[in-house]
């Protein structure tokens, strides 16, 4: 139904798309219903000889029902969306799975920097290494990230991962993803962050784990020299 969405290579992307589809169906039903009522009223109460327009205060319950009944329906839809999306929120945002790889993602005007924890699996130790603009990750592995900003608000957006998270100065925001298909994909900044905001792009490269491991060892060696 939502063929216009970008490719999905995220382990939790199907869940996110499910919520989007659910909301989209509600919106579609509302659009059709309200337009149908609008067209009906336009025709039914069109200009006619001997009929004058008048302003009527909503003093009767019959008149107030035009506000109250839709308000009840909107509230029911809201509760439905909440019920549909709460488990997805828990899975994506609250239940951080055990990571296979830990990185720090830093946004700064106007570049993304990726700091890898290195062989010891801990950030801010001697074996950390950095990649700029290009994020390399192994396929089918859980990547945990700490998202930070070195200056202003940015937003780390990887459409194919169904991942978008603001980077807030002074905060380190944890998150995770698991990419399920090899390839090269777009990373963007989704928060207007200055004059070159639109140039603040990166690339995500998803590789088979053995190729990633080889790349990772080489980077760790090179940067420890
Ligand atoms: Cu930015």
Image: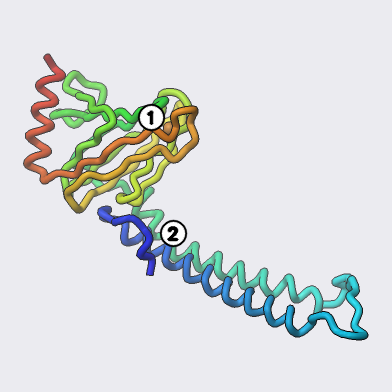
Task: Decide which of 55, 119 is in the foreground and name it.
Answer: 55
Task: Specify which label sits upstream in the sequence, 1 or 2.
Answer: 2
| Residue 216 position (above or below residue 12) | above
Q: Position of residue 166 (x, y in %)?
A: 44, 38
Is 167 positioned to the left or the right of 217 in the image? right
Quadrant for residue 102, please give it.
Answer: top left
Real-space Cα separation, disc 1 to disc 2, in angstroms = 29 Å
Q: Quadrant of ligand 1?
A: top left
| Residue 10 position (above or below residue 101) | below
Is 16 positioned to the left or the right of 7 in the image? right
- Please name the residue shown 6% across and 41% down the image: 210
Q: Position of residue 91 (x, y in %)?
A: 34, 54
Q: Which residue is mark 2?
A: 86
Q: Residue furthest front?
A: 49
Is 31 positioned to the left or the right of 212 in the image? right
The image quadrant where one finds the N terminus is: bottom left
Label 1: which secondary element: strand
Label 2: which secondary element: helix
Mark 1 CB near ligand 1 (8 Å cut): yes
Image mark for residue 33: none
Task: Decide which of 108, 201 is in the foreground and name it.
Answer: 201
Q: Residues within 10 Å of mark 2 (few under 14, many from 20)?
A: few
Quadrant for residue 216, please give it.
Answer: top left
| Residue 154 position (above or below residue 224) | below
Image mark for residue 107: 1
Quadrant for residue 132, please give it.
Answer: top left
Is 69 positioned to the left or the right of 197 in the image? right
- Please name the residue shown 23% across and 49% down the image: 179
């Amino acid at each position: 139904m939502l063929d216009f969405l970008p490719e999905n290579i995220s382990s939790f992307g199907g869940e996110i798309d499910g919520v989007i589809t659910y909301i989209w169906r509600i919106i579609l039903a509302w659009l059709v219903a309200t337009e149908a009522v609008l067209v009906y009223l336009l025709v039914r109460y069109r200009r006619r000889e001997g009929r004058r327009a008048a302003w009527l205060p909503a003093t009767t319950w019959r008149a107030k029902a035009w506000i109250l009944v839709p308000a009840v329906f909107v509230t029911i839809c809201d509760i439905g969306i909440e019920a549909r999306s709460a488990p997805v929120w828990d899975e994506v945002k609250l239940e951080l799975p055990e990571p296979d790889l830990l990185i720090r993602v830093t946004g700064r005007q106007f570049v993304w920097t990726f700091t890898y924890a290195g062989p010891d699996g801990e950030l801010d130790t001697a074996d950390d290494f950095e990649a700029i603009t290009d994020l390399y990750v192994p396929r089918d592995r859980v990547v945990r990230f700490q998202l930070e900003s070195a200056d202003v608000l940015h937003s780390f957006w990887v459409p194919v991962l169904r991942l978008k998270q603001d980077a807030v100065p002074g905060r380190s925001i944890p998150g995770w993803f698991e990419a399920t298909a090899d390839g090269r994909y777009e990373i963007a900044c989704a928060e207007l962050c200055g004059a070159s905001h639109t140039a603040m792009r990166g690339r995500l490269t998803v590789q088979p784990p053995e190729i990633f491991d080889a790349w990772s060892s080489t980077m760790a060696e090179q940067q420890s020299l």
